[in-house]
Amino acid sequence: MNAEPRSKKTQCIEDLRRKVLTQILEPGAYLDETELAETYGISRPPLREVLRQLQGEGYVVLHENRGAQVAPMSHKTLRNFFVAAPMIYAAVTRLAAEHATPAQIAWLKDTQVSFRKAIASGNASDRALWNQRFHSVIGEMADNEFLMPSLRRLLIDHTRIGMTFYNPRKEAMACVSATAADQHDTFIALIEAGDADAAADLAVAHWELSRAQIESFVTPPSIQSPLGRAPEAGDQRGAA
Amino acid sequence: MNAEPRSKKTQCIEDLRRKVLTQILEPGAYLDETELAETYGISRPPLREVLRQLQGEGYVVLHENRGAQVAPMSHKTLRNFFVAAPMIYAAVTRLAAEHATPAQIAWLKDTQVSFRKAIASGNASDRALWNQRFHSVIGEMADNEFLMPSLRRLLIDHTRIGMTFYNPRKEAMACVSATAADQHDTFIALIEAGDADAAADLAVAHWELSRAQIESFVTPPSIQSPLGRAPEAGDQRGAA
DNA sequence: AAAATACATATTGTCTACAGCAAAGTTTTG
DNA sequence: CAAAACTTTGCTGTAGACAATATGTATTTT
């Protein structure tokens, strides 16, 4: 790896991405250009370029003359996510198994090591970020510029949703994390073996694990009757 | 429709999109910031924002310290396109049939009228742009922010590929256009009827029509049928 | 003569200052 | 007292000037 000194602008982009993914910047939060520019030691024009790029990646939404907002998440977001995720994940994983290079496989293994460390540490953010990285690498392996945009978009909200619900102190969580990590190892093995069918199946299974966990929070066990009103998503006002 | 006066910046974005789609700006072409800024009567900082946004949409690629380039198209691009297109098109069309609103259906019908006019006029660019618009509207109907990014990406290259090969003076072309336009009418009917299964099937059929046309150019006839005439499709050259 | 280096030029990247728009607060009027 | 119009304030949007980087060319050295 070349250790090229990342510019302030690059650091800014990466840090904002991280803060959105970990919900340090909450969905719907409004961003102040001047404040951010000062924070990252750059002036407003390049910062505005950063925001435009992050909009393209799906991290923020820009409103003309009214500033930038961290991409909101609504009930509809979750519904659409459930529709798109299994299809894209399966397709991308299949392609990854077909096209992965040895260098990419090594990279995936390294990422998996970090993922397991993050689980052990109990740090929810690290766990979420390394999980996101793991699946991003699989996306890179698929090497399809037409599927990558949707995959990126899915991983952003998948990570944020995971951050919302994850709590390493719960027993059930530890169990889910262990299962997820084992599935990651299987991903690596199947991709390395070039077994596209099995990899695609595993992607669906991996998704089902995540889906079940999400649904257990979205639909509380006590309220499954038609009378129960779904909890509101909370107001859109952001962090100060 | 409200006739809000579009800003110079918005005009710039729309014009650049149009020029990329119609190959007035060829794939791989390099763009000069200063020149573009003067052309659209704005200064470089906002123009750079425009380029960053267009990168996010997949129209251009930015190279650090080395300027912007119209998104290139390679052999791999075509291969990846063939993999992703049928899946995304089918999924989006299915969702469109499930979620389309009356206003959107009216919008789609208007677009179809313009599409038929463009075919009749024999203007390749107008035909391509209205076809792109038609399928973008179907994308809007699907109302899924996770599939839209990939759909947009596909439509860009689908439009550019279409522009490359389309020639309204060829008999076969006119036939394909007529079939495509008829399929569009069927799209409208099926979406209006909410027939998701049939709509998804039609999306695949519509794709097959386009695929066959593209392949007839990419694969020279002499290879398809050894006794056939020499290819007259012209070379595959992309950028200058 | 060929290769490497230094320079010149053109283009990208950035900053400061100003202009424009929107929302909130204040005043005025029915 | 309420409602509407105006003013004020703070942010976003833009322009022009400057700095840094890359590329092409010319020169020098081996």
Image: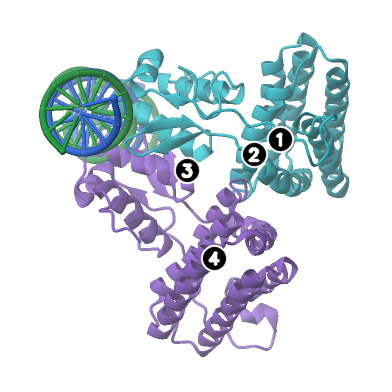
Chain colours: A cyan, B purple, C green, D blue
Q: Which mark is residue B102?
A: 4
For badge 3, the amino acid type reads Gly
Quadrant of the image containing the N terminus of chain A: top right
Q: Eyeballing the image, is A135 above or below A93?
A: above
Q: Nearer the viewer, residue B92 or B222?
A: B92
How far apart, in angstroms, are the residues tagged by discs 4 and 3? 30 Å
Question: Can you give x and y, in whole percent of width and height, for residue A226 in the image?
Answer: 80, 42
- Label for residue B56? 3
Identify the amino acid type marked 2: His
Give the numbered dot on residue A75.
Answer: 2
Distance from Cα at disc 3 to Cα at disc 1:
35 Å
Q: Is residue B157 among what the camera can see?
A: yes
Residue count near mark 1 (Cα–Cα under 10 Å), binned few <14, some 14–19, many ≥20: few
Secondary structure state at the residue bearing disc 4: helix
> Given the image, what chain letter belongs to the residue carrying mark 3?
B
Q: Label 4 lies in what chain?
A: B
Q: Is residue C20 left or right of residue A166?
A: left
User: Which quadrant of the structure image shows residue B190?
Assistant: bottom right
Label 3 close to label 1 by CB (< 8 Å): no
**Residue B198 located left or right of residue B89:** right
Q: In the rendered image of this protein, does residue A51 appear above or below residue A7?
A: below
Q: Which residue is identified by label 1?
A: A230
Mark 3 or mark 4, which is nearer the start of the sequence? 3
| Residue B103 locus on image (x, y percent) | 50, 64
Please identify, in this view, whether the residue under mark 1 or under mark 2 is nearer the observer.
1
